[in-house]
Image: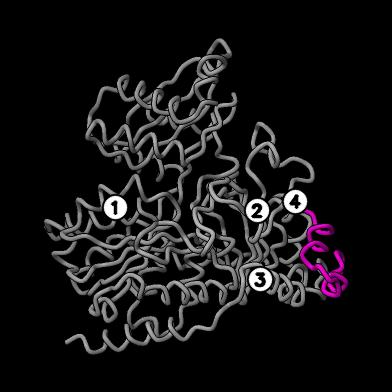
Amino acid sequence: MYLLGAIVKKGIELNQLLAPDPGSPRAQQENQLRELLSRAKETAFGKYYGFSQMLASDDVVKEFQDNVPIWDYASMHERWWKQQFIYPDITWPGMPRYFALSSGTTGKTSKRIPVTSDFVQSMRDVGTSLIRALPNYDLPEKVFESEVLLLSSSADLKEHDQGHLEGEISGINVSNFPDWYDLFYRPGKEIAQIDDWDKRLEHIVSQAPEWNIGAMAGIPSWVLLMLKAVMREHKLKSIHDIWPNLTLYASGGVSFDTYRKDFQNLCGKEIIVMDTYLASEGFFAYSSRPESMAMTLALRHGYFYEFIPFDERGVDDSGNLIDDPPCFTIDEVELDQEYILIICTCAGTWRYMIGDTIRFVNLDPHEILITGRTKFFLNVVGSQLSEEKLDTAILTVSKNNSITINEYSVAAMKDENGDYFHQWMIVCDSDFDESKIRDELDEKLKQANKNYKVARNKALKKVSLQRITKQVYHDFLAETKKKGGQIKVPKVISSSKMKEFLEYID
């Protein structure tokens, strides 16, 4: 019955076994840098910084680090990227056909990240490596002849007045799927091109009974909404009543831990969960073994990485990069040290600070966890709270009180006396004693982080907490145009954004 699935599974297993030895991580990364420099040496950026001379050096990595500065989005866009709207060969050969609009997790307006044909291929290559890792999970053969549901952003890309196309990276990827993907990709390009999230969801729900979904991928919050809508419309007790072969879910964008219980409640059997690190700037890592949600770093797919310690060696008290911070390569990183990720890619991204912080949990292979964002580091008064620590506290308090909290937002604000306090917004449909949950969160963070404890005894005068329902939360996202299949909503937000949130609720 599952002959095709057996053939496909066996082919992937053989591909994994026959894959050549890629060499040491250091060698892989040096080769990636040399290839990137060679491809871009005749661009304006390459000529300005002397890529040809670097390639002749005995230590190309050191020459590169000594001569090319670190860039954030504002400086890279202003100096180089915006020139690519008009001129070719600026930071990468040719002109980008696409620009990826960021998901709105930073800044007041969307960023525009260049997307080249080489870059699109690099993300496919990482996807292929992920598929090669599937034999590690011992998936049943029926999964390999089932369909894959990818909940992306809209694939209806908008043409910019300069001639390129714009959209979120998942929509760009979908629009570049070859036609033969239609054999297994759902909901299909026609539905994926519907720009309005609610209308797109209606089509997915109506066609759900016609599909044989074995795997799905997407940001947990929106996948949960989709699954609940399917179950509600078709009066199901579990999602496996309609998709019995559903076995694998590839999460991404945010930590899965706060969503795990809700997913379990919707499933009639256990599903395998993998994590992925796919951003507008690249597809950097993916889970490759069932024992862990840690992600294997993609070392030979068109990316070169550097790592800046996310401590006093690399940043100031506000989380801003200091002058001339140490930059480590893949062979110099240490376990359980937080790093700011710096990337070079085949989209013409050079020593670019993506804004994420990561932590290595394994060095053979190199596996990482995303710990948060440099700008979403709650440290106004020295509390030094990363998203990872906030998530851990939320999970502990949720479990202790038998409630489920998927989403939350927190901001450092000032009261009428000018004193700082933390304002929490908790999204939960279960009623609870807000003062009790507030005090428990406060205590858990004191126990987990000595800096927070010190701050609470000094400059951080109080903690405030308010609960809202998921419906109110989603209404707010719709009101602020942050509703859709790949929208990532930050957990640490600015005081102005929290004020907007509170005013909307009032």
Q: Amino acid at mark 2?
A: Phe
Q: Main secondary structure of the magenta part?
A: helix
Q: Amino acid at mark 1?
A: Leu
Sequence-wise, which precedes: disc 2 or disc 1?
A: 1
Q: Point out which mark residue 307 bears.
A: 2
Secondary structure at badge 3 equals loop
Sequence-wise, which precedes: disc 3 or disc 2?
A: 2
**As rendered, which of 188 and 262 lies closer to the eye?**
262
Q: Which residue is mark 1?
A: 225
CB contact under 8 Å: marks 1 and 4: no
The residue carrying pointer 4 sits among few (fewer than 14), some (14 to 19) or many (20 or more) residues within 10 Å by Cα, namely few
Q: CA distance from mark 1 to mark 4?
A: 37 Å
Residue 201 position, x and y percent, is 30, 60
User: In the image, which is nearer the foreground, mark 3 or mark 1?
Assistant: 3
Q: Which residue is mark 4?
A: 75
Q: Which residue is mark 3?
A: 346
Q: Is residue 461 left or right of residue 59?
A: left
Sequence-wise, which precedes: disc 1 or disc 4?
A: 4
Sequence-wise, which precedes: disc 3 or disc 1?
A: 1
CB contact under 8 Å: marks 4 and 2: no
CB contact under 8 Å: marks 3 and 1: no
Secondary structure at badge 2 equals strand
**As rendered, which of 76 and 463 lies closer to the eye?**
463
Quadrant assignment for the N terminus: bottom left
Q: Residue at x 25, y 48 (%)?
A: 262
Q: CA distance from mark 3 to mark 1?
A: 35 Å
Secondary structure at badge 4 equals helix
Q: Is residue 254 left or right of residue 384?
A: left
User: In the image, which is nearer the foreground, mark 4 or mark 3?
Assistant: 3
Q: Is residue 415 left or right of residue 119?
A: left
Q: Which residues are magenta?
A: 47-69
Q: Residue at x 36, y 81 (%)?
A: 182
